[in-house]
Amino acid sequence: MNNLPENLASIRARIDAAARAAGRSPDEVTLIGVSKRQPAEAIRTLFAAGQRAFGENYLQEALDKQTALADLPIEWHFIGPIQSNKTRSIAESFDWVHSVDRLKIAQRLSEQRPTDRAPLNVCLQVNIDAEASKSGVDPDTLEALASQVADLPRLALRGLMAIPAPRADYADQLAAFSQLQRLIERLRAKRGLQSLDTLSMGMSGDLEAAIAAGATMVRIGTDLFGARGV
Ligand SMILES: *Cc1c(COP(=O)(O)O)cnc(C)c1O
């Protein structure tokens, strides 16, 4: 029932259709397979089908899978909440971090990024709905944080990430993602931030609206892997 290569083809077709509908090239949108609570073997199967970028939320689980899949040149993305005592391991083991939302964490990731690796690509997570329960920087303090993070030597600030509250309606989804698009446009007008090129937004239920609003990375779990284990 759970045919991973078939799921991958169907997600790619959705990305293609959404990009074309928005007058964009599908090449502008990178698919991140969100593999939290999925087995390493499922990642291996999707890698064999051509998928290269995978996102993980839980550090120890991710490290175990990285060990099991060390023979594959996977691009690893960390997308979960970051505790400050976990930054060293994240800085050493990932290519991207999407969930930076405070300066202290960014400073630690920069200090702890190994010098033999390229600077760590980071996105700032924005709390678009001001939900008390969610991580993410407040839009009002985003610009100050972005300027400080852009100055850190071992990080490459690439853009913004958000997990808007779920909305059933396409128009509502589009409105939320458009807020993030406006925020990155405002940042790009500032000195030192012109090269921001990444909007990480859109999940299984709302990738079409995210792509219409300019997403360059969509993070897909359920519709790619099937339901998650517990
Ligand atoms: C779990 C998760 C996803 C994937 O969500 P699905 O609805 O399963 O596609 C994307 N981004 C983040 C940050 C997640 O935690």
Image: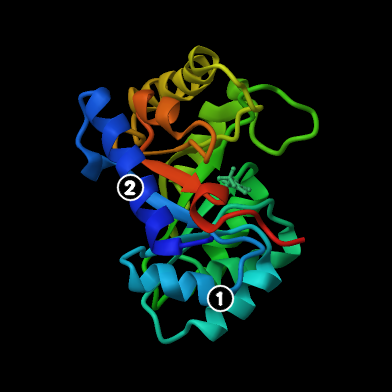
**Which of 144 and 84 lies nearest the eye of the viewer?**
84
**Which of 104 and 118 lies nearest the eye of the viewer?**
118
Q: Quick check: 115 above or below 202? A: below
Q: Amino acid at mark 1?
A: Ala
Residue topped by disc 1: 40
Q: Please tell me which residue is depicted at 60% across the width and 21% down the height of the picture.
A: 168
Q: Quadrant of residue 111?
A: bottom right
Q: Quick check: 202 above or below 73? A: above
Q: Is residue 196 among what the camera can see?
A: no
Residue topped by disc 2: 12
Q: Please tell me which residue is depicted at 67% across the width and 67% down the height of the picture.
A: 59
Q: Residue furthest front?
A: 1
Q: Quadrant of residue 23?
A: top left
> SS of the residue at dot 1?
helix
**Which of 110 and 205 lies nearest the eye of the viewer?**
205
Q: Please tell me which residue is depicted at 36% across the width and 65% down the height of the picture.
A: 52
Residue 163 image position (x, y, % from top left): 60, 35
Q: Are marks 1 and 2 in contact (CB under 8 Å)?
A: no
How far apart in space, not on screen, are marks 1 and 2 (Cα)? 21 Å
Q: Is residue 198 among what the camera can see?
A: yes
Q: Please tell me which residue is depicted at 75% across the width and 65% down the height of the picture.
A: 85
